[in-house]
Amino acid sequence: MSTCPTAPGASSSPAENAFVGRQPIFTPEVEVFAYELLFRSGEQNAAMITDGDRATANVLLNTFTDIGLDTIVGSKKAFINLTRNLLTSHNLSCMPPDRVVLEILEDIEPDPEVLSAIEKLVEEGYKIALDDFVYRPDLEPLIGTADIVKIEFPLIPKEDLADHISKLRALGVRTILAEKIETQEDFELCKSLGCDLFQGYFFCRPQVISQRKTQVNVASIVRLMSELQNPDITVGEVEGIIQTDANLSFKLLRFVNSANAATTRTIDSLKQATTLMGISRLRSLASMMLMTSIDEGKPQELIRLAMIRGKMCELLASESRATRPDRFYTLGLLSVMDALLDKPMDEVIPLLPLADDMNDALLNRAGELGQVLQSVIHFEAGEIAPPISLSAEHMASAYQQALRWIADCKINE
């Protein structure tokens, strides 16, 4: 049986293209209910995933910016898989709750942090699905948060399937999706037992959709992220930062219009787009962009180091009563750009419109800014003689606060 909707045309240059796989989800009448979106790195219909967080971020950005949500799913909803890290990062607010269903993967255990994160998403209006689900009593707290449960049909013995479904219904599950349906017999059995939705190779294999990718300068994203940490930043100031990079501007406009494709309103100015997104959602989007823009050979730990270093610089500047501690955060964040871009720092500096004292601090560790940065770098190396007059206890305290800040997920780890 083949009921696949026709996929939009795709071009074929993996290095320059954005790819997304999609597989339809059907009603009992074999009408398309929604699409599950899947990571693909090329035209081949297979996922080669080495980093789940990065894969999900790629799916989101490719869908909402380069290809367009309306192109991939039309008026239907998009099911998107989440890793535990993305789920608990509180960093998903850029996605429109009315257009997506968030799938909790089967390897995510219902610990308090996970349940709290899901409850927050539900409060924000997101629909939750449990992926590849096989009932266990300890998973009942997850069931209570879910709108849809996707049962792993092949893993449940056919003779146990009716009891399995009855148990889920008794626990309040309204929508049960039978996945990995591969034969007419599978479909008829699951339909007779009252399953509401269906997915599998019997209906349609995933299709790959692609579009030419818009490349954004990593330096522009890092600068945007650093400025977004300023609690007093205004939407107008954010607009001014974004408009210095044409591709970043395009990405934002494309994202906002894709997320709002179900409405008739078209956003055609950066001012409208930044106002509609708001600072929190822009921070979320920038974090996703950074995750997907760094070369895959670069460890995510380097991004984490940049965030910790930035936060330590900010905290130490506050402790020293320096003016504008937010500038110290930016300095620490940018201090790893040479490693991220594989360029010496004197070649990175021209990419960012920074003040002279910032440039001097990055290149020569000069001035108050440079001294604080050098202190943090000394601490990272285990050295106990920082240039500024703060004790080892102060340095250790700032480091612990920075770690807690990362754990609180203001920025995705």
Image (spheres, grey):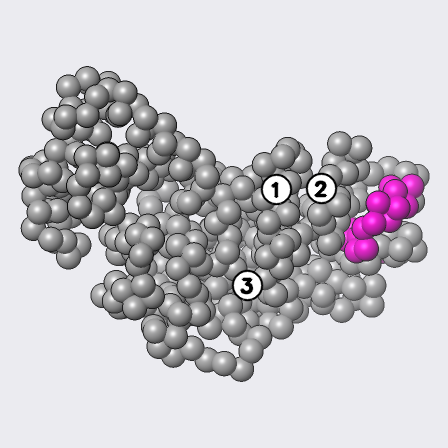
Mark 3 or mark 1: whose residue is earlier in sequence? 3
In this rendering, would 97 be left or right of 392? Answer: right
Residue 109 can be seen in this image: yes
Near-viewer residue (192 or 382): 382
Q: Nearer the viewer, mark 3 or mark 1?
A: 1
Q: What residue sits right under mark 1 in the picture?
A: 116
Q: Identify residue type, mark 1.
A: Ser
- Closest to the observer: 165 or 286? 286
Instruction: Give neighbour class at mark 2: few <14, some 14-19, many 20+ (Cα, 10 Å).
Output: many
Q: Where is residue 321? Give x, y as percent.
A: 19, 39
Q: Which residue is mark 2?
A: 142
Nearer the N terminus, badge 3 or badge 2? 3
**Residue neighbourhood size for the residue with mark 1, other residues' Cα within 10 Å, grouped as few (<14), some (14–19), many (≥20):** some
Q: Please name the amino acid that badge 2 sits on.
A: Leu
Residue for point 7% across, 39% down: 367
Q: Which corner quadrant holds the N terminus?
A: bottom right
Residue 96 is tagged as 3
Q: CA distance from mark 1 to mark 2?
A: 11 Å
What residue is rendered at 60% in x and 72% in y?
74
* Label 2 secondary element: helix
Specify whether residue 166 is painted magenta.
yes
> In the image, what residue type sits under mark 3?
Pro
Looking at the image, is mark 1 or mark 2 earlier in the sequence? 1
Tell me the element at label 3: loop
Q: Residue furthest bottom?
A: 264
